[in-house]
Amino acid sequence: MFESFSIVLFLEAAIRLAVPLAVVALGESITERSGVLNIGIEGSIIAGALCGALAAMEWSSILLGMVFGAIGGGLVAMVFAIFVLGLNSDQIITGTATTLAGLGFTGVIYQARFGTTGSVITLPVLKSLEVPFLRDIPILGPIFFQQSITVYFVYFLVPALWYFLFKTSWGLELRSVGEDPAVAEEAGIRVLFVRFLAILFGGLSAGLAGAHLALDSGTFIENMSGGRGFIAIAVVVLGRWNPVPIVGAAMFFGAASALQFLLQSSGSNLPFPFFLMLPYVLTLIALSGWFGRTKAPGSLALPWPPKSG
Amino acid sequence: MTNRDSWIALAVSLSALLLTALLTAAALALGGYSPLVVLQSLLEGSFGSLDIFFGVTLVRAIPLVVIGLAVTVAFKSGVWNIGAEGQFYAGSMAGVWVGLSVGDYPSFFSVPLVFLSAAAAGAIWALLPALMKIRLGVGEVVTTILMNFVAIHLVSYVVRWPLQESRGVFPNTDLIDESVRLPIIIPGTGLHLGFVVAVICVVGLSIFFNNTGMGFQLRAMGGSKEATRVSGRARIPMLLIVTFLLSGSLAGLAGGIEITGRTFALYEGMSPGWGYTAIAVALLADLNFIAVLVTGIFFGALEGGAGAMQREAGIPAAWVSGIEALVLLSVLASDRILRRLLRSKKKYDVKERELDV
């Protein structure tokens, strides 16, 4: 009895930790499907966290916090898009820059507003919404149906994105831009416009995930994005640019963190860093093709239009 | 590099700095600060006196210069090593491990041994992404990022289990013995021998890249892989291995220098993201080794002056990371815009980047 109880707690925690990652990774997978590798989404997450926190505090509203968080993340992604699409700058360098800019300027704004001593801000906290009837299913109920609203959003987003990617003509256009922009352009698709929308979607998702982080913990802390932007890039690879496996991969990373907290709080002397390391090692193994071929979109991270000379 | 190219490079870097200064001043004014007061306190905190310059700015610059060199080596050769952070930590782990066990030996033996093992560990950390790129065609951007996280979690294990300090309370290692620490080269300041090591690396790499056949081949590979392949001058896989190992060993060496010169112990978060800041250091220097020394000191002054800026002008130290990001964006913008105006060949073009991830 006790055993199954703690497994439920563990899985519930794993989902809780996986959700922001899943949202970021789902957004990033759409960006990458268009052939753009945005390693600057860390900047979008932290901007989303700060904007979300400020809006939620201003209007005491979770919903407005989420909305403004997404907008904040989208704005940072727009800076990335201006450089990458407008100036055709290198995606990797620009992504590094927007990450540094996001972390730096959120720190600046936070310290300007709340002082350098780190006064704690208190926000309305995300409550878990329980789904009637479904929550009463033994074991599964508490794990899947007593979660925050973001979790239900992911339940919605996964089939929606899958349908969009593989069953609509827009999804086909997006994928063709990512595979071979030259062919897509021949077919009359506006490559840069598609990429712009894909980057924007990635930024909005990352911003939403950032707002979730702030509202879930009820406060904003500098650097609270904690490298999730980079982790999400690994999640996308492990999930093979496909919504369903991406959520599975995010769960796996979430479970590793949940295990760490469980081990530390139970005073166990098992070396938890290895559990945290495991998902990255497995992603490396996945990349080396041990689980079958992992194929990225053909034009990922390449400039468009191609550079001459 | 022709004369015209180097003039354009200098113009790009200078206009990037000007753009950064303008943007920063505008942002500061918007935030209600006086840009002049900020500049003054930043300058005083980094160049205000010889003590401050040697003890704060130059000490801060050492890891930035050496890791900046690691990034420069990679980018110059067309390798996107985003993993300097992890390679730095690999070097720090090896460095502190060896450093803790060689306290009984004379310094002329123990210190070089620490440097060697740190460099070797950094190289090993870069080897896996290199092999995955060459053997499996997996792009290095994602693999080097993944290796960063593996290193960070490995540090967290090392400082809590095998190398935890002897009382077993805090997550850091014991201090290395006095005999393994780098001597101070300017008495009364914290400036240690690591600065000389950094300068030697700058000069050595500059000579290697500009005056040797291998250096030429690496630069050619960075220019265009197809060009190297067609000319039949080089074997790409071997050049890639050389690039990864050289870049990784430099970042690892920076870890060894920090351990023996400044921290004397290993702890989590030892690097405040130097692996990423170093990308800005390398690009502002237009991937020129000598210029990396200058831009490394510039970033060292920014980070060193940040403390004084916060104490004296009440400007949050977080501004500095914002300014660093503005530097990077300004370099990208002015590179594009200036070169477009001057219709010169663009610099950061990577035509053949095979990013199979």
Image: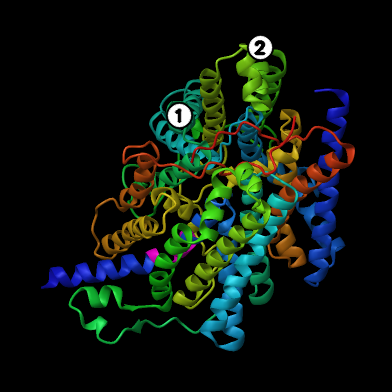
- Tag 2: Cα neighbours inside 10 Å, few (<14), some, or many (≥20)? few
Residue underneath mark 1: B127
Say which quarter of the image contains residue A300.
top right
Q: Position of residue B339 (x, y in %)?
A: 83, 39
- Which residue is at the front of the view, B335 or B18? B335
| Element on which disc 2 rests | helix
Q: Quadrant of residue A281?
A: top left
The residue drawn where x is 14% and y is 68% is A3
- Give the letter of the chain under mark 2: B
Nearest the camera: B202 or A103? A103
Disc 1 secondary structure class: helix
Residue with the most extreme front position: A187
Can you give x and y, in whole percent of width and height, for residue B226 in the image? 63, 22
Magenta span dominant secondary structure: helix
Considering only vertical position in the picture, is B163 above or below B229? below
Residue A119 visible (yes or no): no
In the rendered structure, the answer to whether residue A58 lies left or right of residue B45 reads left
Asked if badge 1 and badge 2 are on a common chain, one would say yes
Decide which of tag 1 and tag 2 comes sooner along the chain: 1
Q: CA distance from mark 1 to mark 2?
A: 23 Å
**Numbered label attached to residue B137:** none
Eyeballing the image, is B267 above or below A112?
A: above
**Extent of the magenta region:** A18-25
Q: Is residue B100 magenta?
A: no
Q: Nearer the viewer, residue B206 or B15?
A: B15
Q: Which residue is mark 2?
A: B213
Give the color scheme: rainbow, by chain, secondary structure or one colour: rainbow
At 51% from the left and 20% from the top, the residue drawn is B237
Residue A267 in view: yes
User: At label 2, which amino acid type do we have?
Assistant: Gly
